[in-house]
Image: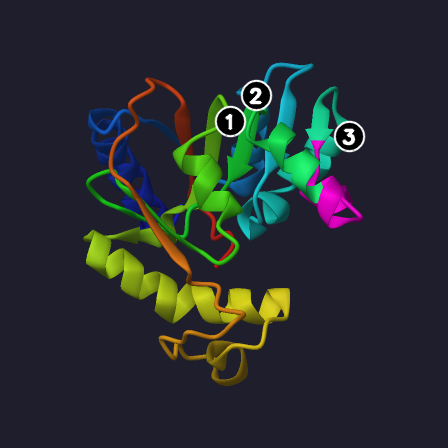
Amino acid sequence: MSFQTDSYELAAAALGKAFAKHGMEACYCATAAEAKEKVLSLIPEGSSVTWGGSESMAEAGVFDAVCQGNYEVIDRKSAKTSEEARALYGKIVCADYFLTSTNAFTRDGILVNIDGASNRVACIAHGPAHVIVLASMDKMCASVEDAVNRIRTLASPPNAIRVGVKTPCAKTGVCGDCLSPDCICSQILVTRYSRVPGRIKVVLCGEKLGF
């Protein structure tokens, strides 16, 4: 066991209490495989399940497992027209479970996310009955300000390259604080408290996932 793993386990114990103060539940899994099983254990069979763009969930194998499981999968990418997308979004916001990661979180239990289309941050804030967040421990930051800086410095550039947008950061690898039509930093969501007890569950992972 590495010193980093020891550190994460110790921090996760404190984070569980911190998230609880903010109306969210949190648990810790040492590996991505354990985290995947934990996420799946939180979703009853037969539930409607949907998600926002999340490399963490994809890398952990959660999406593949859900698609192969006994769930009603609502995949926003299945829409072939704008009309279908609009109708599908109505189902997404009424889903039983919304799966996502978080771009960053603070050591006192606050989630921080930056989004372009903003469907992801919208569903974290309101809509689906349950939100399950999978986040690796390397996304922990000291404050909301540090979290925003982390996202713009470390998460947004590779995300922009991944989705193929034409933004300054996709060309240079460095945030240009842009107002580009393709900007993926349109909305900043700070989730400092969940008014619905147990709606947001955070699965923390000791292995690196996502950006």
Q: Nearer the viewer, residue 60 or 70?
A: 70
How far from the left and from the top, in percent, is residue 66? 69, 30
* Residue drawn at 48 percent across, 28 percent down: 127
Q: Counting residues from the N terminus, which is met first, the one under dot 3 or under dot 2?
A: 3
Instruction: Answer whether labels 1 and 2 touch (C-beta < 8 Å).
Output: yes
Q: Which residue is mark 1?
A: 128
Name the mark on residue 96. 2
Q: CA distance from mark 3 to mark 1?
A: 21 Å
Q: Amino acid at mark 3?
A: Gln
Q: Amino acid at mark 2?
A: Asp
Q: Which residue is mark 3?
A: 68
How far from the left and from the top, in percent, is residue 130? 48, 24
The region drawn magenta spans: 74-84
For mark 3, does the 10 Å Cα neighbourhood hold few (<14), some (14 to 19), or many (20 or more) residues? Answer: few
How far from the left and from the top, in percent, is residue 65? 70, 33
Position of the N terminus by quadrant: top left
Q: Decide if residue 210 is on the left or right side of residue 89.
A: left
